[in-house]
Image: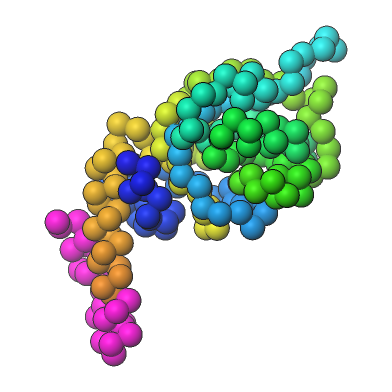
Amino acid sequence: MLERLAKLDTNTVSDALDFLNLPGATFGIRPLWDCPKIVGRASTIQLGPKQGTAPTVHLITPVIASITADDRILVITGGTHGISCWGDILANASKIKGIRGSIIDGMSRDIEGSESIGYPVFGRGVTMISARNRLVQIASGTTLHIDNVEVSEDDYVIADRCGTVFVPAARIEEVLDLAERIAHRQDGMVQAVRAGQSVEDVMHDKKFEAIKQP
């Protein structure tokens, strides 16, 4: 499934989800350096404001330490505007563990550190303000809410320059089947326009509706 997903892009997967009336596409979670597209399975992490002053294990580190699979993408939510929930040391630890990248519904600091080791980070922006004594990890492996999308442990993730899309694990084959048909039809539309056919006809709604048909 991951090999098939890797041949697509977020635009095509988003279109497939639209045809199936499934949420999954998000807005504004984009690469925080010029990193490559990533595809993988979600390891979910929920953050929240720190209560009290007692020392705690640094957020996200227990999840990184526990990962043994090579298909993982960290999906992190609960960040606070202007406060980092990702940084250089976490990126290095994740790289060593073979994690494919991080998707942050929040912000990262030390983004040059992630870039220098080729570790992909997608998020809503960059900052220099540390999470220490501000944010803690509340849960992991649970269902998160990003925009209007539910993201559960082991859901499929694809992220590229246009943004980030999540696909429910239970629907991945159906979504991929349709997305592959969409990609094939759209490639044909591009070739038709390049061959001189009227774009008005090529892009008519009836052409897009036909994508639903095998």
- At 64% from the left and 58% from the top, the residue drawn is 34
- At 55% from the left and 58% from the top, the residue drawn is 161
Frontmost residue, 122 versus 72: 72
Image check: 62 left or right of 14? right
**Whether residue 44 can be seen here:** yes
Q: Residue furthest bottom?
A: 196
- The picture quadrant where one finds residue 191 is bottom left
- The picture quadrant where one finds residue 108 is top right
Q: Residue furthest top?
A: 54
Frontmost residue, 179 versus 63: 63
- At 24% from the left and 58% from the top, the residue drawn is 181
Quarter containing the N terminus: top left
Magenta-drawn segment: 190-214
Image check: 71 left or right of 108? left
Q: Position of residue 93 (x, y in %)?
A: 68, 31
Asked if residue 67 lies in the magenta stretch, the reply is no
Q: Is residue 88 above or below residue 192?
A: above
Q: Position of residue 187 (x, y in %)?
A: 30, 70
Q: Residue furthest left?
A: 214
- Most prominent secondary structure in the magenta stretch? helix
Q: Is residue 36 above or below residue 137?
A: below
- At 83% from the left and 38% from the top, the residue drawn is 129
Q: Position of residue 211 (x, y in %)?
A: 21, 61
Q: Is residue 194 above or below residue 60?
A: below
Q: Position of residue 212 (x, y in %)?
A: 19, 56
